[in-house]
Amino acid sequence: MKLIARIAGMIVLSAVMFAQAPLDPAKLLQLPTDMWPMANGDYTGRHYSPLTKINSSNVNSLTLAWVYRANPGSGPAGGGGTTSATIKGTPLQINGVMYLTIPDHVWAVDARTGREMWHFSWRSKGGWHIGNRGAAVLGNTLYVETPDCNLVALNIKDGKERWHKEICDLEQFYYGSVAPSIVKNHVIVGVSGDDLDIPGYVESHDPETGELQWRWYTHPDPNDPEAKTWPSVEAMMHGGGMTWGPSAYDPELNLYYFGTGNPQPVIAGRGRQGDNLYTESIVALNPDTGKLVWYFQASPHDTHDWDAIEAPILFDGEINGARRKLLAQASRNGWFFVLDRATGKNIVSTEFVKTNWTKGVDAKGQPIPDPKKEPQFDGALVSPNQGGAVNWPPPSFNPDTGLFYVNATRAFSVYYLYDTDDKPEGWGGNDRSGWSEGMLEALDYKTGKVKWSHPWSGNGGVRSGLLSTAGNLLFAGDNASNLIAFNPKDGSILWHAGMHTSMSNTPITYELDGIQYLVVGAGDSIYAFALLAK
Amino acid sequence: MRHLIAIALLTTAAAIAAGQAGPTERQKIDNAAATRGRAVYAQYCINCHGSNIKGGDNGPDLIRSVVVLRDRLGNDIGAAMKKLDGHPRDLTPEQIVDLSHFLHQRIEATSSNRNTNQPPNVVTGNVEAGKAYFNGAGKCNTCHSPTGDLARIGTRVTPPINLQQRILFPSVARGGKTTEVTVTPSSGKAVTGTLVRIDDFNVTLRDTAGEYQSFKRGPNIKVDVRDPLAAHHALLDQYTDADMHNIVAYLESLK
């Protein structure tokens, strides 16, 4: 009996040890195999796994390994209403433990069994509870944003709070939703909120103490030439540009990349004539100083709420016979951009769905907005609609096929201007959506041309993130609750499974004990699939 | 200019530093108090901060003011007015509370002005041009008639923004129509009915007898979906905004 008790004790200890194992920072610089150590999988943001145990020849044998249902309880959420248990964030998997989030909640779950290990709940003071995009881990600490503007650090062993720091001002209608990023000794966070005219920024915190290291606002210094893209300093400093999307990092160049959101006021742009830098831009910062290195503006003077926060994807490729360090983004405005990520110089600018709002591109490769398609008092018929040709769910780049995969939407709506004031503030208008169609596209990064397209049945775009793997697989979700494996070379369907609702986040994969798992979130549940022989 | 930014950053930093002890909910607006506060504003504040509260040459925008945003029932604006030159010193505590309700009412209205209670006027086109488009390039008269299904449509669908939306984005259900589908198995009889659901793997219909039927899709089964609104969807790529406004004006005139 004593022996059994001792063995049982050892088993418990070993389980606890698993849960306690910190994240080795070196893992952040490797391709994800036994872990999914950051929301993007790795710093490139490709959402690509080198794992091959699940592959195109055996994907038909995938079976359900476990399901975990997140239950946040019934406590009040404050601010933007009750918390809906929809998992939008990409989970992490570190040393056999999965960490998943919804607004105000974090769970640690055994990645082999789906059993809950701990649940952290934040008592909210308010803020929009629209979604949480995920957490970050460094060492023994997990970092997560809350809707009421806090960066919270938890001990990954037991989910107990280590500290929290306010990262934005709830009173100015900011809120927190972003997955923090770990770059060396920096925890970098972005902010959300476009109800009022407030400036966007990213800021960096010390991983141990939470102290602020630097903050970079998404507008120029008034003395910079770029400030001339605003009519006044006041308009610029209340000009929006939230930072609520994913980021990427190149360790060789030591550059940190992300996209910025819409300018403010959102729809009524007559009080902010000009390009409105650095809103709706892809930017590169030095992560140690927070200084801007380069920018490329996806939507100059936007008036359609087309945040350019979609994932910047890093890969190396061949352009005109030369090897280049590239960055690609499929942007919410319907345009696909490929840039040199060392300099920000444009290589490709092309529509990945047909749009009707531009007059071509300028010498820098930036789309030129057609003033006639700005919102009008009697309406302007615009494509894409406010939801965009893509939105926050990440695309995937597969180095084996050289193709960039994106869940695209072609949509029309009418944009109306409501605000007749000389100085519009807030939104000042809106669109009314009507009709849309969705398709999964594979783009040739060298040209932006559509290599293949899979139309989704029925009307409406699909919002699911994508994952491709070295097993010759591309995983996506449709609007009919299916998780689908495609052949990434030609778009043919290889496998599917029906879930209780449609995929609401981005698939991840990892290998534990020789078994490769495929994990997706759908509504309040996490589904894990694997090849389980016995 | 740098000085301005420094002040702005300090203001923001102070707001953040104080944020931890901040109140948990936004101020609940007392509309009667806000109405009284409007009168206080008109008497004491309007000359510098403007009729729209958004500032002017002599005073800053109070909707974008961090002091006002952080204020609760006058606690911050009352204190600020005592410190700032050129501000009234003789307001009663009740007047300051009323002013607070008024300013927060304007902030709330600004934060939600993506919505409107006043439908925009979308009848700006030319009736005759709209009629010409209806019978010409738009080919609307192929399926519709101004004396048939569209008779008195300008009276039946109001306000006109709803008419504009229905022209562009008609609904199958609203039009009393259905999306028809015919499923033909390679070794069976074709089944036609109303489409219930379709994805890449299954198609479901309700047949003419009202029976619910599901089919597994595959290479040996033909599925033909007939969207009655396909012509409308195709027009979205062809309309100019002038076409859109003209056709709205024409149909709105059918009363």
Image: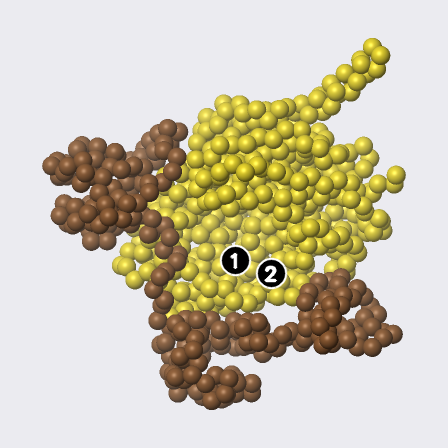
Chain colours: A yellow, B brown
In this picture, residue A106 sits left or right of residue A146:
right
The chain under label 2 reads A
Circles 1 and 2, Cβ within 8 Å, touching? The answer is: yes
Q: Residue at x 88, y 39 (%)?
A: A534
**Whole-percent x and y of residue A102?**
57, 40
Q: Is residue A68 visible?
A: yes
Q: CA distance from mark 1 to mark 2?
A: 10 Å
Quadrant assignment for the N terminus of chain A: top right
Name the N-terminal-most of marks 1 and 2: 1
Secondary structure state at the residue bearing disc 2: loop
**In the image shown, does A320 or A478 lie closer to the viewer?**
A478
The amino acid at mark 2 is Gly
Q: Residue at x 49, y 32 (%)?
A: A123
Secondary structure state at the residue bearing disc 1: loop
Most extreme residue toward the top is A2
In this picture, residue A17 sits left or right of residue A251:
right
| Residue located beneath label 1 in the image | A387
**Residue A461, picture quadrant:** bottom right
Q: Residue at x 73, y 53 (%)?
A: A498
**Residue B176, picture quadrant:** bottom right
Determine whether B99 is above or below A164 in the image. below
Tags 1 and 2 on a common chain: yes
**In the image shown, does B15 or A202 lie closer to the viewer?**
B15
Most extreme residue toward the left is B90
**Whole-percent x and y of residue B249?**
39, 80
